[in-house]
């Protein structure tokens, strides 16, 4: 893939494959699929990165719908219908070093704005790889009860640290109406040929 690659022409699988092949955290810490997407950066909203003045990723409330002991799972696509999205990113230290084996725990509403409070649909965790990377295959959640669409995430790192936060979509008109919305928690989102790709890097304090 060249710097001018149009992600909308690629499948999510191809985008993911390219991203996983891209290399170190430092080389791809600032764009949705850097170095691939660096040439397209002007089209992307800015999100906080490690090594900047923005500080660590801000925490946010857990909300009422967390379920303990979720399964280890990265592919939620069989759990619900909706716009497919591949969520990718890093877990990094404040000095941009990758955090391997961080537990990334994701849960969110379905395309009707409902949570699965009995089972573990649209719930699961995985561990970052040696380069601090995580990815999930899931869907875009819908708004519900005054909340703009969002993902819930917990990042657990040894020995006993947890970052609980939420991620948001840049194109949602309800963002500014949601009192919990935080623009520093906006993902970068781009269209692929068969859905969307979202990018967010977590920077630990
Ligand atoms: Fe929620």
Image: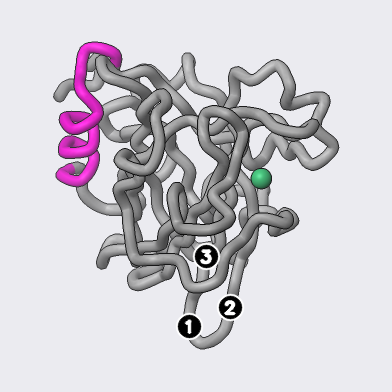
- The residue carrying mark 3 is 155
Q: Does 40 appear in magenta? A: no
| Distance from Cα at disc 2 to Cα at disc 1 | 6 Å
Residue 130 visible at all: yes
- Residue occupying image coordinates x 49% and y 65%: 93
- Please tell me in which quadrant of the rendered image residue 185 appears: top right
Dot 3: what SS?
Answer: strand
Dots 2, 1 in contact, CB < 8 A: yes
| Distance from Cα at disc 1 to Cα at disc 3 | 10 Å
| Distance from Cα at disc 3 to Cα at disc 2 | 8 Å
Q: Is residue 161 above or below residue 166?
A: below
- Residue occupying image coordinates x 52% and y 65%: 155
- The residue carrying mark 1 is 158
Residue 31 visible at all: no
Query: Residue 5, how many percent across, how many down?
Result: 23, 16
Query: Residue 59, how many percent across, how many down?
Result: 70, 57
Q: Nearer the viewer, residue 80 or 49?
A: 80
Q: Which badge, 3 or 2, comes first in the chain's sequence?
A: 3
| Dot 3 alpha-carbon crowd within 10 angstroms: few under 14, some 14 to 19, many 20 or more | many
Magenta stretch, main secondary structure, is helix
Numbered tag placed on residue 23 in the rendering: none
Report the span colored magenta: 8-21
- The residue carrying mark 2 is 161
């Amino acid at each position: 893939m060249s710097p001018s690659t149009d992600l909308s022409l690629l499948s999510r699988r191809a985008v993911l494959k390219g991203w996983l092949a891209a290399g170190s955290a430092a080389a791809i810490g600032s764009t949705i699929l850097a170095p691939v997407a660096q040439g397209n950066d002007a089209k992307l909203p800015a999100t906080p990165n490690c090594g900047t003045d923005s500080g660590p990723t801000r925490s946010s409330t857990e909300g009422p719908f967390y379920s303990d002991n979720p399964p280890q799972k990265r592919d939620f696509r069989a759990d619900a219908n909706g716009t497919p999205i591949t969520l990718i990113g890093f877990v990094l230290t404040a000095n941009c070093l990758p955090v391997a084996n961080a537990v990334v725990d994701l849960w969110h509403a379905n395309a009707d704005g409902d949570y699965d409070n009995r089972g573990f649909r649209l719930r699961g965790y995985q561990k970052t790889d040696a380069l601090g990377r995580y990815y999930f295959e899931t869907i875009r959640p819908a708004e519900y009860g005054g909340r703009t669409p969002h993902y819930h995430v917990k990042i657990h790192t040894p020995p006993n640290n947890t970052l609980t936060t939420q991620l948001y979509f840049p194109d949602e008109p309800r963002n500014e109406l949601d009192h919990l919305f935080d623009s520093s928690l906006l993902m970068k989102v781009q269209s692929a040929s068969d859905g969307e790709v979202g990018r967010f890097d977590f920077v630990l304090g």
